[in-house]
Structure formats: C-alpha cells, structure tokens
Image: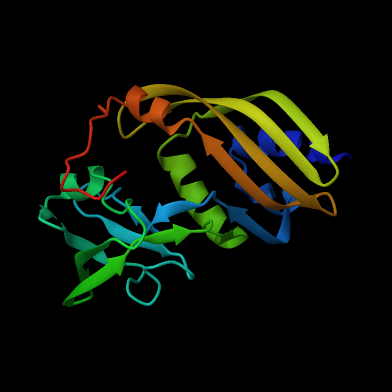
Amino acid sequence: MSNKDVILGYYKEVVNGKDFTVLDKYFHPDYLSGALPYIGMGVGLDASSGDKVVVNHVYSEGPSAGKLEVGDEILFVQDGDSRLETFEEIRDIPWGWGKVDSPFMLRVQRGEEEIEVEITRGIIEGLKMSLEEFKESWEKFATQKIPDEKVEILYIIEEGDMVACLATATAMHLDYDRQYLVPGGEFFRLKDNKIIESWGVSDNLAFIRQMGFSVEEPKKIMQST
C-alpha cells in the first residue's frame, strides 16, 4: 500500500466516516499534529459551554507556559486601555494575537481562587499535540459541532515520505445553524505506512463569513492583528 493510499483510506474511514476506533490503523504511536507558526499566547480556548471561556490546552514552550493552566476560566482581559469582560467579548475579540513582546493582563478563576496573570505575546513555532490529545479534541469537535462534515479531495500528491492534499470541506455547523464550504490543504509525513506528522491550512476568513460573522478593522487601542 502506498502512502497516498493510506491517506485516502484515512479520509474515507476517519474524516468522512467518523470512525475514530480505527485511528491506530492510520497513525503512528509517535504522531504529533502540527500548526504553522503564529504570534500569540500559545493556548487553546473552549467557549462551548455558552457562558464562559476556559483554557483547554497550554503549549509547553509558549508565553503562557507556567502561567496558565488547563481549566482556568478567563474572567477579564486588560490590554492597554481596553478591557474585555463579557463572555461575548472574550469569546469573539482576538485579544491573544498581536505584536511580539506586547504584554496584556488576564484575571482567571482557578478553582476557588482568582489570579491575575501578565502574558507577553511571542512567536509560537507550532502547537504540537500528541495522538491522544489530538484524538480527544478532534473527536469531540467533529461529533458535537460538525457531525455531517464531508471532505472532498481535489488533488493528492505523494513524494517520498510526504503526501499533500488540496480539498474542500462542507458541513452544517450546529453552533450557528449555517452550512459552510471551505477550501484547505493538508500535509502529511508518514513512517512505516502510518501518519507521524500532519499540518493543515484552511480559508478561515471564508469560514467565519459563512458563519455570519462580520470582519471589521480592529480598534486602535487593541494590539490585535
């Protein structure tokens, strides 16, 4: 079986078939999911409760390491003269992004205690997640938010241990009751006929517009980009 055939099988059974029981068939035990570098704080945030924003991942080599913990609830963000306090503001305004070395203050709820934390934005080289972390976050999102998502591969190329795909994804997002069609690309490195690394890029601007969000110039007092 070629590496390209492995990826085609992965899309058929896991991505489109939502059969997460066969992940070991396609993924190497040492798998790491990768992300492209960006400027930010190096955390994952979960707003699925509908009333609070909670840290669900902290990148071990990012600016938030040792300052934020999984489970911290964001109570407010102080960025210069701008203060974000409501659930909607903290969820919707991209306060974590901005200029390298620009600081901002967070107040978080950690158990019974409220803590203020200062974080300085930096370059995140790429958020790496293990197979177990990747499976947990992706399976939850795929089954609860976009259970009917289908990915159509338009082009697929294999060279050495690498496979690259150009594809489109369509689904009804249950949070917004809107359907999207978004193009994207995914790159895989394989070892022993199993995926050991992957990186994905997609047209996020097209996605948020199809979900009904408007895109506006940020306020000058915000550090956002």
Q: Is residue 154 left or right of residue 36?
A: right
State the image coordinates of residue 10 (x, y, percent, origin top left). 70, 39
* Residue nearer the viewer, 31 or 97: 97
Compared with 154, 41 (above or below) is below
**Residue at image point 36% right, 58% down:** 100
Residue found at x 15% / y 48%: 221
Residue 14: x and y in percent read: 64, 40
The N terminus appears in which quarter of the rendering?
A: top right
Q: Is 214 positioned to the left or the right of 22 in the image?
A: left
Q: Quadrant of residue 145?
A: top left
Numbered marks: total: 0
Is any atom of residue 42 visible in this view?
no
Please name the residue shown 25% across and 27% down the image. Answer: 214
The x and y percentages for residue 140 are: 46, 48
| Residue 43 in view (yes/no) | yes
Q: Quadrant of residue 44?
A: bottom left
In the picture, measured across the screen, residue 81 lies left or right of residue 155, that is left
Of all residues shown, which one is farthest toward the right? Answer: 1
- 214 is higher (above) or lower (below) than 164: above
Q: Position of residue 31 (x, y in %)?
A: 68, 58
In the rendered structure, the answer to whether residue 192 lies left or right of residue 11 reads: right
At a point 40% along the width and 72% down the height, the residue shown is 65
Q: Quadrant of the C terminus?
A: top left
Near-viewer residue (192 or 95):
95
Which colour style is shown? rainbow
